[in-house]
Amino acid sequence: MTGATGQLGGATVEFLLDRVPAKEVAVLVRDPAPASHLAARGVDVRVGDYHDRPSLEKAFAGVDKLLLISAPPFGDVITQHLNAVAAAVRAGVRHVHYTATRRRADSPARISQVTEWDERTVAALRESGSAVTVLRYPLFLDALPSMLGSGALTTGLRVPAGQSEAALATRRDLAEANAAVLAGTGHEGRSYDLGGSEAVTMAEVAAIVTAASGGEVGYQDVSVREYVAERTGEGLPEPVAQFLAEWFTSLAAGDFAGTSGDLERLIGRKPQTVPEFLVPLCAPA
């Protein structure tokens, strides 16, 4: 699997090691040092670089199932993903799992560096001849507090999210779903819409925060321009603030709405809810 030293990938490896022997797990890294704890547990740590296709082919040799975790933004990710797909084909990988983002088929919203990556990567995978499983994620619940901004508890939730519901999920629960699919069978050709078992609006999030914090926290559906201005005022680079705003406009378009139940079925329990995650963070000291 790729991305093994990131938050999502690291958690996926941990859940996978609960299900299969370490000797059956191989991870791809650019630098083996951060993965030394995995090597010490018997995981096969392989070195490769997305921009070096031969190194990927070598790293993928003998791999039956590959989890391709989408690369981080602000780089030439399409090239990286297409190199990984081509290398997987050359190495004879039988089954590729790809982490994409949830999106309605007729959605007008597009997230820069995400929507196009997903479309082109999924198309390349489906043309590759390998079995494919697409794991479609919502906005990460554990990313929400930082996306709301440092003043959320005082100025309220001011984001361009409209009135749509979103079934948010934590990276940890999504990682457990990754591991369940990788360790299981019968997932070839499937696409899973992963999200929480309960969908909430940002107004409902504000009410949860209000009850937990003891203060009055409202919600305002502001423009993208306002949101970007406020986040850059807190020190975020403008491209990052714009990128975060697009996730909220995707939420507003209903891309993360709907509770398919896929995540709950894969992990065998209800995923962490929005109140369960937010209340401990917002409770008065």
Image (spheres, rainbow, N blue to C red):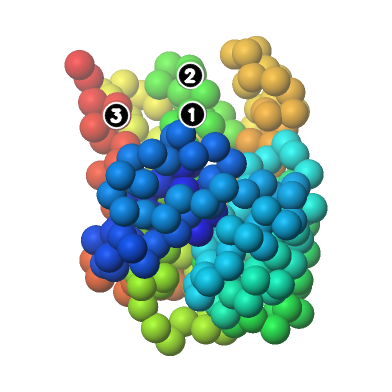
Q: Residue at x 52, y 63 (%)?
A: 67
In the image, is residue 199 above or below residue 94? above
Identify the element where label 3 is drawn: helix
Name the residue carrying label 3: 281
* Residue 226 or residue 187, whichever sits in front: 187
Say which label, 1 or 3, has the lower sequence index.
1
Left or right: 67, with 249 as reference point: left
Say which label, 2 or 3, has the lower sequence index.
2
* Residue 261 or residue 130, whichever sits in front: 130
Q: Residue at x 61, y 53 (%)?
A: 70
Q: Amino acid at mark 1?
A: Ser
Inter-mark Cα distance, 2 to 3? 13 Å
User: Residue 2 at x, y = what percent?
Assistant: 54, 54
Q: Is residue 54 visible?
A: yes
Left or right: 53, with 264 as reference point: right
Q: Residue at x 27, y 65 (%)?
A: 21
Q: Amino acid at mark 3?
A: Leu
In the image, is residue 259 above or below residue 189? above
Figure quadrant of the C terminus = top left
Q: Amino acid at mark 2?
A: Ser
Name the residue carrying label 1: 146
Left or right: 190, with 282 as reference point: right
Identify the element where label 1 is drawn: helix
Name the residue carrying label 2: 150
